[in-house]
Structure formats: C-alpha cells, structure tokens
Image (cartoon, grey):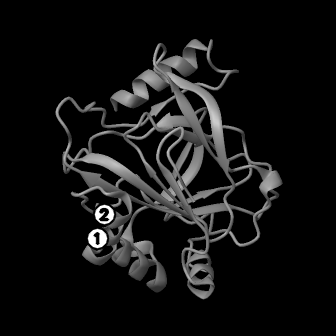
C-alpha cells in the first residue's frame, strides 16, 4: 500500500520471510541489557541500540543487506529518488524497544546528518514483536502539518505495528509521526522494531536541524518545562 497523504508512505506486510523475522526478534538484547541506550523523559520513553557489536548474526547480516547497493537500488526504483546513500553508522536507527509506558511524542526527524552532512530522506521501520496486541497501543501515527504553528495539525493515519510489517516514508515532507500515548502492554511484552534511514544530497535551503523536533501533547502544550525541554533538545 502506497499513499501520499499526509506525506509519502508505503506499507509492506511480510517484509522478511517469517523464519528470518522470528530469528531477528529473538536476537534483540534483553530489555535490561547494558547494550541499550535509554531515553526516559516526557517526550520519549524508549531504548535503542545501533552498535553492530551487539547485533546477533541474522541481525548483523540484515543491516548489512539493508545498507547495500543492491537494496538501495531497489529503493530508488520504488521511490523515484535518484541519489540515496546508506548510513552504516545507523545514526538514530538500529534496534528500538519500548516496554510498558513506552511512548514517542509526535515529531519531525533530524534534517541534516551531523557527520555526513547529508539530508535524511527515507525511514524504513520493520516491526518485530510476534505477539503484539494492537489494544496495547504503539501504532505509528502520521499527522498533517500546521503551517502557522509549525506543529502537527491532526492525526491522519495510524499504522498498527503488526509483526513483520515494514513502513517506508519520506521524512522531508513535514512528516510528523510518533505514538504519543503510553503503551499499556503487560510486563515482559515489548514493542520491537528495526530502523534504517537513508540519506540524499540536501537541496538548496534545506533546514539544517541536526536533532528531532518534538511536539508537545495536548496535555503538555502549556507546560513551560516541557516547551523548554523541546527547545533545548533540538539544540543539542
């Protein structure tokens, strides 16, 4: 399924063969492992790992393929984008995991890669929790853009994180996305995903933002501490 509203996105079910997807899911580090980098603040509650040293064999091979010339050529044919480059450092990507209470405020991704100085163009996210129940939340929300406030306007699409489902979307179209409502999954259940980002040559006048720009939830929008956190975080 490929749609252009509120911005270009493509949903692909059964992205990997099932055996491969299950193997990658099992190779995720334990939730309490030191392999994870933890984010726990009012804007995001998640853990991530982009260190290749901590990837299991199937995961390592998968990231290698998803960053290969062969796969990127396929992406260029699908999207019509001529110049796409891998980010083998997986800046912001890699493995992501959210436990009970996990969340991710609606946000815009960073615009310019801090090391490569290329524009982040495409996100590829693959969901890897076999037994996830959509009633626990965690569906990826895509929001329209409010040009007057430079904030998300309204939720247009919610894509449930079905096992082995991939979502590919353009991050350069005021592409507000996230899941701001805390997960209600039971202890021992996790929202697992694998993320790879693709870069391109920045057009003239591209926003130089090196960090994600978060939007407050409705409950947070008049909280000066939250608004200051958003402003300070984007400057880091």
**Is the C-beta separation of discs 2 and 1 under 8 Å?**
yes
Q: Nearer the viewer, residue 43 or 125?
A: 125
Q: Left or right: where does residue 28 sit relative to residue 197?
A: right
For the image, the number of numbered tags is: 2
Q: Residue at x 31, y 57 (%)?
A: 80
The C terminus lies in quadrant: top left
Q: Is residue 35 visible?
A: yes
Give SS at disc 1. Answer: helix
Q: Is residue 105 visible?
A: no
The N terminus lies in quadrant: bottom right
Q: Left or right: where does residue 196 sit relative to residue 132?
A: left
Q: Left or right: where does residue 199 sit relative to residue 137?
A: left
Q: Residue at x 46, y 51 (%)?
A: 169
Q: Indicate the position of residue 133 as horizontal and vertical percent values.
A: 80, 61
Q: CA distance from mark 2 to mark 1?
A: 5 Å
The 10 Å Cα crowd at callout 1, few under 14, some 14 to 19, many 20 or more, is some
Return the residue at label 2.
76
Q: Residue at x 69, y 61 (%)?
A: 190
Q: Indicate the position of residue 194 as horizontal and vertical percent values.
A: 51, 65
Q: Left or right: where does residue 93 sit relative to residue 17?
A: left
The 10 Å Cα crowd at callout 2, few under 14, some 14 to 19, many 20 or more, is few
Return the residue at label 1.
73
Give SS at disc 2. Answer: helix
């Amino acid at each position: 399924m490929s749609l252009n509203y509120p911005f270009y996105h493509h949903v692909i079910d059964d992205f990997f063969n099932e055996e491969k997807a299950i193997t990658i899911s099992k190779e995720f580090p334990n939730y309490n492992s030191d392999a994870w980098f933890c984010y726990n603040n009012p804007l995001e509650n998640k853990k991530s790992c982009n260190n290749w040293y901590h990837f299991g064999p199937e995961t390592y091979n998968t990231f290698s393929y998803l960053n290969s010339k062969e796969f990127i050529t396929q992406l260029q044919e699908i999207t019509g984008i001529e110049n796409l480059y891998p980010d083998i450092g997986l800046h912001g990507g890699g493995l992501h995991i959210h436990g009970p209470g996990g969340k991710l405020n609606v946000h815009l991704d960073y615009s310019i890669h801090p090391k490569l100085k290329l524009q982040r163009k495409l996100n590829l996210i693959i969901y890897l929790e076999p037994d996830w129940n959509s009633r626990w939340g965690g569906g990826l929300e895509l929001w329209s853009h409010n040009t007057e406030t430079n904030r998300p306007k309204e939720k247009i699409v919610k894509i449930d994180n079905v096992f082995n489902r991939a979502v590919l979307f353009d991050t350069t179209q005021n592409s507000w996305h996230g899941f701001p409502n805390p997960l209600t999954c039971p202890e021992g259940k996790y929202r697992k995903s694998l993320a790879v980002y693709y870069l391109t040559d920045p057009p003239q006048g591209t926003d130089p933002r090196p960090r994600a720009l978060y939007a407050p939830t409705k409950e947070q929008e008049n909280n000066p501490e939250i608004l200051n956190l958003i402003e300070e975080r984007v400057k880091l």
